[in-house]
Structures are given as C-alpha cells and as structure tokens.
Amino acid sequence: MNLLLRKADSAEAPSIATLVNKAYRGEISRKGWTTEADLLAGLRTDTKEIEHLLSSGNSLLLLCILDHNLVGSVCLEKQGNIAHLGMFAVDPLHQGQGIGKHLLAFAETTALETWGVGRMVMSVITLREELRAFYLRRGYRCSGELKPFPTESKLWHPLVSGLQLEVLEKNLCGA
C-alpha cells in the first residue's frame, strides 16, 4: 500500500471535516467499525472547527493519502508536555486495511519530533470496546480517569444517556 502521510494545510479543511463526519456519524459510517451512529446524532465536526485547529499554534492535523484520495486524518493538540490525539478518522470504505495503524504511528512520531512531548493522551467513549481494544494493542493504557461526555454541542446530540469518556495514554519516550 502506497500511503502518503503529511501535515494538512488550511485549504483542506472542508475535506477533513467531510472525512471525520463520514467516519463517525451517519449511515456511511456504518460501513466501517468506528461508527458512533448508534450513540450520537449530528456531525462530529465542521469546517469552521477544522479551520480553527489548523490556524492554532498548538495543533496539527495530519493526513493519510492513498492514490491521491484523502483516506485518513488525525488532530494533535499540544497541552504542556503531552499531545492530545483526537478526531482520528479513516474512511469507512478503507478501514481494516492497516491505514489507521500507519497514521497512528505517524501521529506519535510527529508529536514527539515536533513538540518533544513525552506522552500522548486521548479520550474514548467507554461503550466503544472495540476502539479501546485497538488502542490498547498499540501500547496505550488506561489512565483510570473517566470524564463525563460533553452534553452541549450545536453539532450533535447523544442518542443514549450516561455516555462517559475514558482517558488512554501512551509514553512516547519508550520508558
């Protein structure tokens, strides 16, 4: 598989928002295993949020291109000596091909090389056992921290009550 992994630029904000929404929400997301369509309705993000992240001095959006098509993206945000990983998305029609593994490794290397951070953290919906297991197989561990799921958004609303986020973390320095 010939993947191109690189940083995003501001002109790509609409394409990134479309990919993230396709991976997480709506009927098309059900073609992959990362769907949240049974848990949340609405959009995961919008172009305005992506543009804001791209213009921020403390965030990076990374892309995975296959045959000139955007098939994956991830957002990194620097928070002190850690990098927060979010909006990790692979096109549902390309899931299960190893793209996510390559993109995650690229994100970890980029965070370490760009910011010198020692840890990567992320929040995963506790009901998403298969997603949690994906990260655990890649060296992440449960931090023991649970957070309430955000309840206020103009983009989405929960379809089930009691959603929680679990914080997973990984040491990027090998210790």
Image (spheres, rainbow, N blue to C red):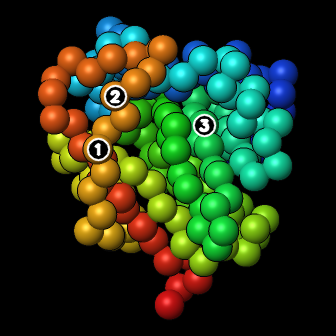
Which residue does the image show at 31% across and 38% down from the upper left?
149
Q: Identify the residue under disc 3.
A: 73
Q: Earlier in the sequence, mark 2 or mark 3?
A: 3
Place of residue 34 in the rendered image (x, y in percent of width and height, measured from the top left): 33, 33
- Is tag 1's residue or tag 3's residue first in the polypeptide sequence? 3
Disc marking residue 117: none
Q: Secondary structure at mark 1?
A: strand
Q: Residue furthest bottom?
A: 175
- The local secondary structure at tag 3 comes to strand
Image point 60% across, 18% down: which residue?
A: 46
- The x, y position of residue 121, in whole percent, is 48, 61
How many angstroms separate mark 1 from mark 3 (CA)?
25 Å
Q: Looking at numbered disc 1 in the image, what kind of residue is underneath it?
A: Pro
Left or right of 91: which side holds 138? left
Amino acid bearing label 3 = Ser
The percent coordinates of residue 56 (x first, y second) are 79, 42
Q: Position of residue 100 (x, y in %)?
A: 48, 45
Q: Are marks 1 and 3 in contact (CB under 8 Å)?
A: no
Task: Tell me: residue 65, above or below residue 111.
Answer: above
Q: Residues within 10 Å of mark 2 (few under 14, many from 20)?
A: few
Query: Residue 151 has which mark?
Result: 2
Task: Mark 2 and mark 1 in contact? Answer it, CB < 8 Å.
Answer: yes
Tell which tag, 1 or 3, sits nearer the viewer. Answer: 1
Give the farthest residue toward the front: 152
Q: Residue at x 66, y 68 (%)?
A: 80
